[in-house]
Image: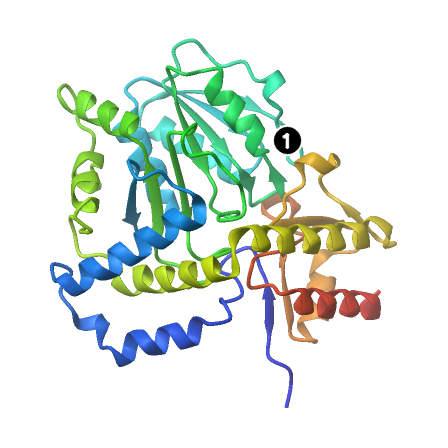
Amino acid sequence: MSRQKAFFTAGPAELYPKFEEFAKEFIDLQLGSISHRSQQFKNIYQHTDEQLRELLNIPAENAIMFAGTASEIWERIILNCTEMETFHLVNGSFSKKFRQYSQELERHAHVFEKPMGEGFSYSEINVPEFAELLCTTQNETSTGVQTREGDIHKLKRGNQSKLVAVDMVSSAPIPELDFSLIDTAFFSVQKSFGLPAGLGVWIANEACLERANELSTRRSIGAHGRLPELWKQSKEYQTPATPNVMGIYLLGKVAEDMNKRGISELRKETDQKARKLYNYFDQKEGYSIAVEKPEHRSRTVVVIDTEKPSSEIINALKEKNLIVGAGYGPKKSSQIRISNFIANTPEMMERLIEAFDEIG
């Protein structure tokens, strides 16, 4: 019998080790048929809310709300928190899309853009005077570049009158963000939480709510996913529309399991695996690390330049039931992307490195 496939893709990704156990529990309890207005659902929402607060150290006054995707939350934030101008740090395809959403919503979207593979440091960022929202991408999935938590915190400290949004889609829960400093953050579950796609999580503070309420008195903040309504419902462990009950339930179970392991231990293990991968490819002939500066290298999505076409490497690994991703966009044929999510265990990493030794 062939070995089961191991996924090192940047999302959808390797499923959390206890996914099948939690999914079976959901089915056995017939939770797919319950009303989202029932106490049973409120209990599910509350459990997930509490586990995420513990895992990410989210203040009690912040709201935790749910959407279909993280991309949807880009639009929700722009509609609910801005009227005229946004500012975007762009160094890859997803941070660029965040800006494009703002432009499509007829905001003046200022940009500080860097070439793919380069990161940002606070000292070089000049924020436009009238920008209402500063949009950062903590982990750029397309390029494997991270923005350090400290630089994001400094950005807020230096711009107290502006809202700061953090895209942590492909890094949560690993970054140690101070939610008393940032205003809003969001992620989806198909990355390091190891779940099937279909659920986005939106965290926002009272400053975002105040801004949405103030804006709503003179312009539309959208018809679906309005922050004031999402906020009000979330405080009762409810949603305005029928939600992804299974996704919310599974996220709560996974977050609970992560809390049992301890977030500090998960971060330590993630860092150890990342160092192993970067050290390996730093010395391997025919490969090089795409992100030059170590402090800007992602802890959760390792991007490697390849001398030979990436498709050859990907196919050779596929023969061994190891699935890695190609580069993104223009780098598709010259890079590989390797996830270093929580479900990618140290044993899996050893298996992957052994396979690279074999294929050359």
Label 1, on which residue? 119
Task: Assign the C terminus to one quadrant of the image.
Answer: bottom right
* Spot occupied by residue 22 in the image (x, y as percentages of width and height): 38, 72
Q: How many marks?
A: 1
- Taking the image as drawn, is residue 307 in sight? no
Q: Is residue 159 above or below residue 335?
A: above
Q: Secondary structure at mark 1?
A: loop
* Spot occupied by residue 115 in the image (x, y as percentages of width and height): 64, 30
Seen at 63% across and 90% down, the residue is 1
For mark 1, does the 10 Å Cα neighbourhood hold few (<14), some (14 to 19), or many (20 or more) residues?
many
* Spot occupied by residue 95 in the image (x, y as percentages of width and height): 50, 35
- Taking the image as drawn, is residue 160 in sight? yes
The color scheme shown is: rainbow
* Relative to 21, 171 lies left or right: right
Q: Residue furthest bottom?
A: 1
* Relative to 35, 344 lies left or right: right
Seen at 23% across and 24% down, the residue is 210
* Spot occupied by residue 188 in the image (x, y as percentages of width and height): 41, 51
Q: Is residue 38 above or below residue 67?
A: below
Q: Residue furthest top?
A: 129
Quarter of the figure with residue 318? bottom right
Of 1 and 151, nearer the camera is 151
What amino acid is at disc 1? Gly
* Relative to 92, 358 lies left or right: right
Q: Is residue 40 above or below residue 237?
A: below
Seen at 29% across and 28% down, the residue is 208
